[in-house]
Amino acid sequence: MYILVLLLAGCAVWLLWKNHCLKRDVYDFAGKLEKGLSELLEGKSLKRDIYRQDDLWGKIYEKLCRVSDMYTHKNREIYEERESLKELVSDISHQTKTPLANVKLYQEMLSDGAVTEEDKECLRKMGGQVDKLDFLLQSMVKMSRLETGAIRIKKSEAPLAETLAAAIGAAVPKADKKGIRIHVMYDEGIRLNHDKKWTGEAIFNILDNAVKYTENKGSIHIHVKQEEIFTKISIADTGKGIPSERQGAVFNRFYREPEVHDSEGAGIGLYLARKIITMQDGYIKVESEIGEGSTFHIYLPNQEV
């Protein structure tokens, strides 16, 4: 009887010990796996000479090393492609400035000496096309620099009112020509950790788009509201509106509405706006109905306390 009790006690102790060893091995394996994955996520290269055991972890670690090598190689390729693209963009920007400036100069000289109204009209149209080409090239250079990281977002705490004022001021001349009134409602005390220059660029692009597609004597309303997590900048126009099936496409590069395909613009402004806001951990969404205008909502994270 005593022998049976001793055997049962011994079995219980052995099982407890095995269970302890198993849990220790599982925790150890999970810890090693978590460490390896963390190093991969941080972009670190795993060293192959750390684990050489021919066990489960050794096999898993070998596969993690292969993944690490693949990511390292791919990241190097991406970096080299970005550097090449930066150089190409820089060359394009440099090489196009002088020819465009010369064309503008010749166009102005010819306009001064034009005699017939037909000649003047042709030169005026040529000047418009040159301006459009200049704008397109500048927008593409700006877009490429943002995408390749040549231009970086530099956030600092600043009043949002200053950023809004700069963007609105740049949009007013075009709005005045069409008799469009811009109404603004915001709290001057709102401060955000944001890049003033590029955030202003994003707001201006949306305002410029609103002015472009709003009829003469229309109106644009800007309303800023600080919510719990984000500050929302709403820009509402009285334009033609965007069909629901196209609202997701307006942020694509070079997208133009079919009905206005021949009007001014390159289809880059809204793409750049979303890119700039996304790079600051924010987002943009649009609400629109045909004939009722459109409202673009910009969400920027609030200043951390």
Image: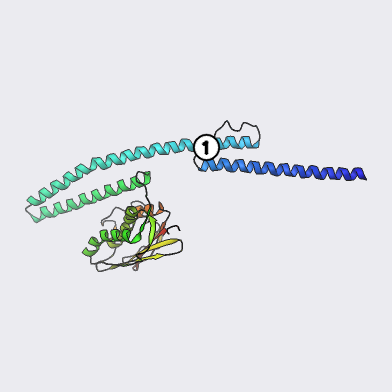
Q: Residue furthest right?
A: 1
Is residue 251 in view from this perspective? Answer: no
Left/right placement of residue 230 relative to residue 13 reads left
Q: Residue at x 68, y 41 (%)?
A: 25
Where residue 69 appears, x then y in whole percent? 51, 35
| Number of residue marks | 1
Q: Quadrant of residue 181?
A: bottom left
Q: Residue at x 30, y 46 (%)?
A: 141
In this rendering, the answer to whether 61 lies above or below 164 is above
Q: How is the image coloured?
A: rainbow
Residue 15 or residue 137, whichever sits in front: 15
Residue 7 or residue 221, whichever sits in front: 7
- Residue wearing tag 1: 68
Left/right placement of residue 287 relative to residue 35 reads left
Left/right placement of residue 90 relative to residue 277 reads left
Q: Residue at x 29, y 49 (%)?
A: 139
Q: Residue at x 36, y 38 (%)?
A: 83
Is residue 109 in view from this perspective? Answer: yes
In this rendering, the answer to whether 245 lies above or below 56 is below
Q: Residue furthest front?
A: 305
Where residue 46 appears, x then y in whole percent? 54, 36
Where residue 305 appears, x then y in whole percent? 45, 58
> Which amino acid type corresponds to the residue marked 1 in the rendered image?
Ser
Quadrant of the image for the N terminus? Answer: top right
What kind of element bears circle 1?
helix
Q: Quadrant of residue 188?
A: bottom left
Q: Quadrant of residue 27?
A: top right
In this rendering, the answer to whether 42 lies above or below 267 is above
Residue 40 or residue 16, whichever sits in front: 16
Within-10-Å neighbours for mark 1: few <14, some 14–19, many 20+: many
Where residue 82 appears, x then y in whole percent? 38, 40
